[in-house]
Image: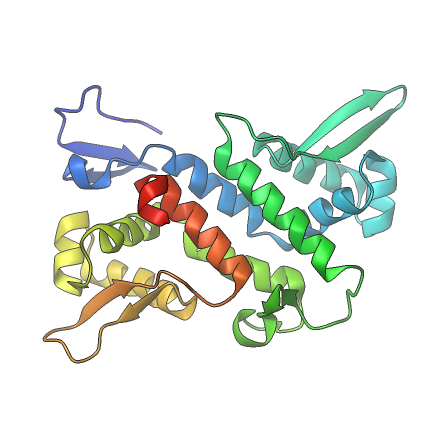
Amino acid sequence: MRRGQTTHVEFHTFEGVEFERFALVEVVGVDETVTLFRVLANPLRLRVHRAVHDEPGIPVSRLAARLAVREVVVSQNLRILQAAGLVASRPSGRFVHVHPVMTPRSDRRSSAVAGRLLTTLWEKVGDAEAEPALVWEPVGSQSAGGDPKSLTGAIVFVCTAYTHLRRLLILRLLAQAGPLTQETVAEEIGMSAPALTRHLSKLLRRGVVRRVAKVPGNQWQLVERPGTQFQRALHRMVLEQLLGEKAAR
């Protein structure tokens, strides 16, 4: 992530995109949030995390056998989870043992919260892999895309609301100043109308924004308490990262 050198610089650059109005889109920690949700929005990595939760200290070789996935593939995904602060590894002789990370770190607050949420989820769901997805409340039947009975599919669907910087900027702006017309959002963020339409559509399908009825123009508003307990907890975590804790309570 690259930033202007001082707060006087009126632009912000991330992933090769320059955003104007630095005061509106300064995003301390947002690069970490985008990275975290990209890590979580992957069915195999979620299966790996769940298996590590079910058997803390599991050797990588046994983890691969349990998931019926090549060990090299499991190792690659473990490195990604470890870089995100969600698991930790410990060599012991010829084996590498993997543990879930539960202790918050000052520089990885969102990862610690996400790790605790996933752990609570795995505990509540138990071993019922064949059951419809239960994300503290039935979520899979409504929002898991093409796979309504897949727990990992439901989680991936929820997480993909937050896997792009532009969508986080939309959420932050609506939280600060909404409801706003689509034209105002596009102007404030510096986004083309077609790109904004795509991102708003994705956020709408995931239940985190809504159109405001009975007002002039095409206005959009943040949904403060989306769908399920799990989704609400993730949404709160994102808003706390974007706005500060007091703004998301």
Place of residue 190 in the rendered image (x, y in percent of width and height, measured from the top left): 17, 48
Is 32 left or right of 186, judged from the image as shown? Answer: right
| Screen quadrant of the N terminus | top left
Q: Is residue 163 visible?
A: no
Rendered image quadrant of residue 155: bottom right
- Name above or below for residue 39 compared with residue 124: above
Is 233 left or right of 189, judged from the image as shown? Answer: right
Place of residue 236 in the rendered image (x, y in percent of width and height, measured from the top left): 42, 51
Viewer-proximal residue among 195 and 228: 228
Viewer-proximal residue among 65 and 205: 205
Residue drawn at point x = 86 percent, y = 37 percent: 61
Place of residue 150 in the rendered image (x, y in percent of width and height, measured from the top left): 66, 67
Is 187 left or right of 213, judged from the image as shown? Answer: left
- Name above or below for residue 213 compared with residue 114: below
Viewer-proximal residue among 168 and 197: 168
Q: Is residue 100 visible?
A: yes
Q: How many marks?
A: 0
